[in-house]
Amino acid sequence: MKKHQLAFVSILLFTVFFLISCEKETSDPNQLLIGKMKAVTDSLVKNTDIPGIVALVVDKERGIDWLYAAGVSNKETLTPMDVNHTFRIASNTKTFTGTVLLQLVGEGKISLNDKVTKYLPQYPTANGITLTMLANMTSGLFDYFDDDRWVEGFKATPLRIWSPTELADLSFSHPLLFTPGTQFKYTNTNTILLGMIIEKVTGNKLATEINNRIVVPLQLKNTGFMASGTALPGNHGRGYDFGDLGIIGDVTESYDVSNSWAAGAVYTSPRDLQQFVESMVEGGLLPDSLQNRRLNNDFNQLGPVQSYGLCLSKLGSFYGHNGVIWGYTSSMYHSSDKQCTVIIYYNLCQPADHFPDSLFLRFMEILYSKYIF
């Protein structure tokens, strides 16, 4: 057989093998699902202002473990987004603070029925507010983020270091929005007070408690709590903002994170956050009785499939939270029923219509063929 005939046969065999391989790949149910999730993620980067997205989907029942980066981590250098980057998780921090609180309850050092004034008597307005009400957002407290003095102060000096007491004082300068325990209103002040109470009870900084009780036991290598400061630790991309409070463009180091403290100052990486949310939902961080209460009691129904409990959001069978802070938005959820975890973050703080929860819901539609999950 001549050389060119051998080459032709080799090419033909390779082509047939390649086509068979592609057919096998595209007929793989998991690859089809991953392909759809990838397409939706890529479309968001292409058709919106989001510079970059990292998405993690682990479905243990199906055998899916997909960690994907789309877009760029730096708009100037066009450096690709990196799946291992650290990022600010904003209000997902509330689940860390809430976990420490419940650990103290389990140790008998505190009770969810305690009134705020037991620990912070300087705020007599909180005499009717229990720790449960702080944790499930039914306290009626005013959100300091809505205080004009805070808004104007942040615009004027975003690098200012805020103490927790200053933030709480802003809130208590306003009357209660409703009788405690009668309504739901998501309020960052609630978690600030929980952080202050944790420090009062333990005698330690909140950062120390989060580190010793969560970060070290779970061996989270890229996770930490920043009481203050501007620099995002670890290998990270840039964070961008549309400028609703005066800081615009690349805002990675444009503000001091103390303004969020117990309500939003944790940073982490996708795999670390996966480890945390799975442990938080599956158990191991709390005594069984408190774990059962956290997953089943004290919830306020916010919609057909959404509710909010003890520093914890619930969407269908998925537990977790979401978060927004200058430069970064994120969502984290885990379902024991489906053995599925989803972590999403954008390096952009943008309007709510492009929030990571929307992409989470699209992933649910792809994985389970419905939004009700």
Image (spheres, rainbow, N blue to C red):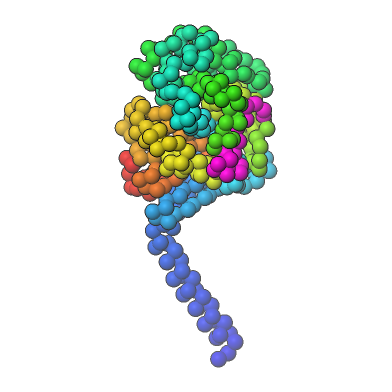
Residue 137 seen: no
- Magenta part, dominant SS: loop
Q: Position of residue 159 (x, y in %)?
A: 67, 22
Q: Is 222 a magenta residue?
A: yes
Which residue, as the protein is rendered here, is positioned at the far bottom? 1
Q: Residue at x 66, y 20 (%)?
A: 160
Q: Residue at x 47, y 23 (%)?
A: 110
Q: Position of residue 93 (x, y in %)?
A: 52, 31
Please identify the quadrant where the N terminus is shown: bottom right
Please identify the quadrant where the C terminus is shown: top left
Which residue, as the protein is rendered here, is positioned at the far front? 108
Q: How many circles with numbers are drawn on the protein?
A: 0
Q: Residue at x 43, y 23 (%)?
A: 111
Left or right placement of residue 151 versus residue 277 in this view = right
Q: Position of residue 67 (x, y in %)?
A: 52, 50
Q: Residue at x 39, y 43 (%)?
A: 335
Q: Position of residue 144 (x, y in %)?
A: 53, 16
Left or right placement of residue 45 versus residue 316 in this view = right
Left or right placement of residue 339 versus residue 86 in this view = left
Q: Nearer the viewer, residue 17 or 150?
A: 150
Q: Is 368 a magenta residue?
A: no
Q: Which corner quadrant of the image does residue 328 belong to?
A: top right
> In the image, is residue 16 above or below residue 57?
below
Q: Nearer the viewer, residue 272 or 315?
A: 272
Left or right placement of residue 365 versus residue 199 in this view = left
Q: Which residues are magenta?
A: 215-230
Residue 122 seen: yes
> In the image, is residue 199 above or below residue 86?
above
